[in-house]
Amino acid sequence: MKNLLILFSIIFSFSTLEASEVSEWFEKESNQFLEIMNNNEGTESENYEKYKYFVNKNFAVKSIAFGLIGENIVEKSSKNQLSNYLKVFTDYLIKTIYKLSNSNSSSSIVLKDVDIKNDIYIIKSEISYKKSSANIYWKVIDTGSSYKIIDVIVENTSYFVTKKSEFNKILRKNRGSLEALIIEIGKI
Amino acid sequence: MKKHLKVILLTISISFLQISSTYSNDEVLESGISYDEIYDPIEPINRAVLNFNFFIDDIAIRPIVKTYKFIAPEPVEKGVSNFFSNLKEPIRTVSFIFQGEFYKSFNSIGRFTINTLTSLGTFDLASRVGMEKNETDFGITLAKGGVSSGPYLVIPIIGPSNLRDFSGDIIEYFADPISNSVPDREYIAIGNGLNERVEIDEQLDKVRDASSDRYEMIKSIYYQNRNAQLEEEFIQNLPVPKIYIE
């Protein structure tokens, strides 16, 4: 019984430690994001570069990109095609985040809760702008060397799920052609 | 005459629901739904209706909404939003009874009483005293009763829906105790519709140019938001990408 209690307390203290580490990471990166978001004084390309750095540092871009097209397409595509797609998608992701954050100026992102399910951290936060606020959930993985975001859910709308529907539609319309998808998302 | 109309509409909605049950894929209460394979057999028609809705929105509704948002101070906007939300509390009460959620049902009618008596519903005092608003509607009641969603629909002027939710809207329109007790219920419906449009104005602006296929985007967002109202662990259960070494 005593051993069982010790085991439980060890497991519990590990998960608390992990949660506090990911919380610390989140606080730091969200503050940096706010700084980028609220300092739009530079030129458009300078601001874009700041977002690019942020996205590359904190998002699991490859996992998101390949997850959106699905394993079948990843397997049947050439290395060259995949690397081209990854490049175009990264640009697409940066532009989407840049566009969305450029139209808002936020005053705070407050961490509300951290949960873990199947090795994925679910960070609940609240972003406020003007007098309104929105709940944002971040799904984060621990890669060993750093934490990476795999999905952002704003008020029940998941970026990954929404984009997967869009990308699947384009792929289905073009008989699974990755080239067609690259052209389509390159237009944005 | 009005009674006959109600009976006809109820019959139509019940028969719709039967059709929707036969048409539905292998969904069980929507949970575990594959978002990129939503049942959409009349997609070309839906797409045309969506384009029509955006056209009407561009030329008529959006200018009204933008002007209203420009003129009305934020407290007024909030007050109007609270007013229309408060009018829905009695029908929420009925919906919760059908769902067997009696505590929430009491909460809804309590909120209606407090907010109506203190400010005609323009100020949400009930939330301040711990009676939080719980959203629901007849579409959710039907879903909880085991009715599947049926095909995705884009309704002219109204927007995205599905057979189950649209049937729920029809039932709600005629069963709503508030609408039934005022002479010109159409004005309430129009006011409520415009208020809902005001509330999603910013999101709609983003959808206009943030997507390679706005039809798919709106459809996905609609289903995610409906499922969030149905599933307790919605966020946890959302699909995630397979992890590749970065």
Image: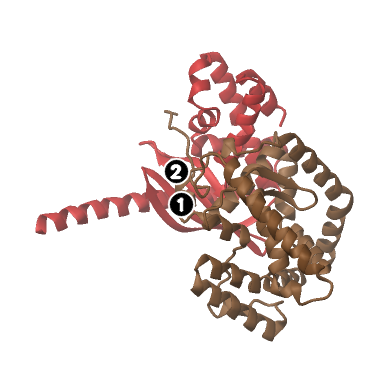
Residue A93 is situated, as x and y percent measured from the top left of the image, at 61, 35
Residue A57 is situated, as x and y percent measured from the top left of the image, at 50, 36
Determine if residue B48 is in view.
yes
Chain A shown in which color? red
Chain B shown in which color? brown
Q: Is residue A144 left or right of residue A52?
A: left
- Give the secondary structure at mark 1: strand
Camera-side residue of A138 and B183: B183
- Nearest to N terminus: mark 1 or mark 2: 1
Residue named by callout 2: A140
Residue named by callout 1: A123
* Amino acid beneath label 2: Val
- Give the secondary structure at mark 2: strand
Residue B77 is situated, as x and y percent measured from the top left of the image, at 76, 68
Camera-side residue of B116 and A78: B116
Q: Chain of mark 2?
A: A
Residue plotted at (43% across, 32% down)? B243
Q: Are marks 1 and 2 in contact (CB under 8 Å)?
A: yes
Residue plotted at (89% across, 49% down)? B59
Mark 1 burial class by Cα count in 10 Å: few <14, some 14-19, many 20+: many
